[in-house]
Image (cartoon, rainbow, N blue to C red):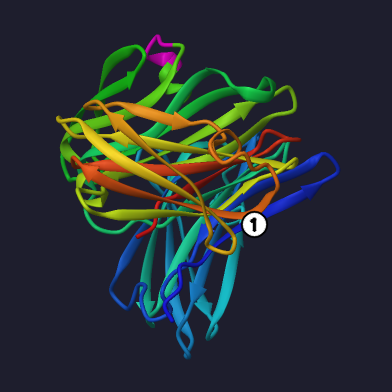
Amino acid sequence: EPLSVTSRTYNLAPDGTFGQFLASEAANRGLRAGDEALLIQLREDSDFRTNIGLVNGWKRTARVAVDLHGGNGDLLATTTRNIPPESTVQLGRPFETVGGRTDIISGYARIRVLSGRHLFAYASVIDNATNDPTTIPMKTGAGSARSWIAAAANGEGAHDSMWQTDLALLNLSGQQATIELRFRGGETATSAIVLAEGEQRLVEDVVGELGVTDSGSLEVFSDRPLFVGSRTYNLSAEGTFGQFLDGHPDVALAGADETVWLPQLRQNPDFRSNIGLVNTGSAASRVRIRLYDGDGVELATTVRTLAPHQRRQLQEPFDLLAGRSDLDEAAASVTVVTGDGVLAYASVIDNSTNDPTTVPMVY
């Protein structure tokens, strides 16, 4: 029967875990000869390192070219790799080992399939101080002129955590792009950015740069299509513990009578789960959230109303709504009762390290 499959890969340390979410891909899909994909928001300097993974789901050898670009769009290096059948090849620190660069704060890679099919790519950006990884999924298509980041923050959180968000914007439209950032939370703020063709801008602590101490969502509106991504992280004395939050175009949002799922949730002494909801529409939305244990037994249900452009977070709902703090395996469904343009996600946080892992919604 069809399954929804997800995973979390993590560094196991004496103090706890530092992990990253990795979604599954259908085995008969992926890139094929002539296709291209992008890996944005890469970094390779004294603070972070990047690995790129190339996955061949085909039963024959595939050949892939990887073009490495700096933040200004310059091509730094190109390398080609043969990927054996049904195998993964990892490029460790490619900006250094291939391009000879260790000063890349904002880089990206273009993946070109020269031969083969069922090819996938991803990157992992790792904090050198904490060894905490953040997954960067591949992007295809032309980008979007309007994207939403479900959560962005500058401020304190539970368990003495301190949260910030870095935003990545990549312009491959062929023309200069004029962008407006719109932060929506308890406070609102806007800012304008201009990107040259081929430029990727990393806006570190974007909410703080907007002059706000708050948490909310971020709308990216541009006169040209962009590729958008972000990393929200707990900033500690040892380094950062972060999670990737993708830029969602309008076409990737849930509408009335649609149900999305949040799998792989946990609520126990080691981990806590929060659920986030964002209404990107111009009218109010009502959503129904159902909580389940690992056997599929419904534990609790609740309905929330979201004002236009509102973000709401359900803090540890398995504990507060269902009275359960012993769940190693749990899930939630989110049904849009009325409204349109709803975005849902979950964050699973290691209580020992305050390291978050994003769980995106799946249909």
Q: Where is residue 206 in the image (x, y as percent from the top left)?
A: 42, 22
- Relative to 202, does residue 66 appear above or below in the rendering? below
Residue at image position (68%, 20%) is 160
Residue situated furthest top in the rendering = 211
Q: Can residue 227 be seen in this view?
A: no
Please tell me in which quadrant of the rendered image residue 340 appears. Answer: top left
Q: Position of residue 152 (x, y in %)?
A: 43, 27
Q: In this view, does 168 lie to the left or right of 272?
A: left
Residue 96 magenta-highlighted: no
Please tell me in which quadrant of the rendered image residue 307 appears. Answer: top left
Q: What residue type is labelled 1?
A: Thr
Q: Position of residue 319 (x, y in %)?
A: 61, 37
* Span shown in magenta: 208-212
Residue situated furthest right in the rendering = 14
Residue tagged 1: 9
Instruction: Give SS at disc 1.
Output: strand
Residue at image position (68%, 42%) is 325
Residue at image position (20%, 30%) is 284
Magenta span: predominant SS is loop
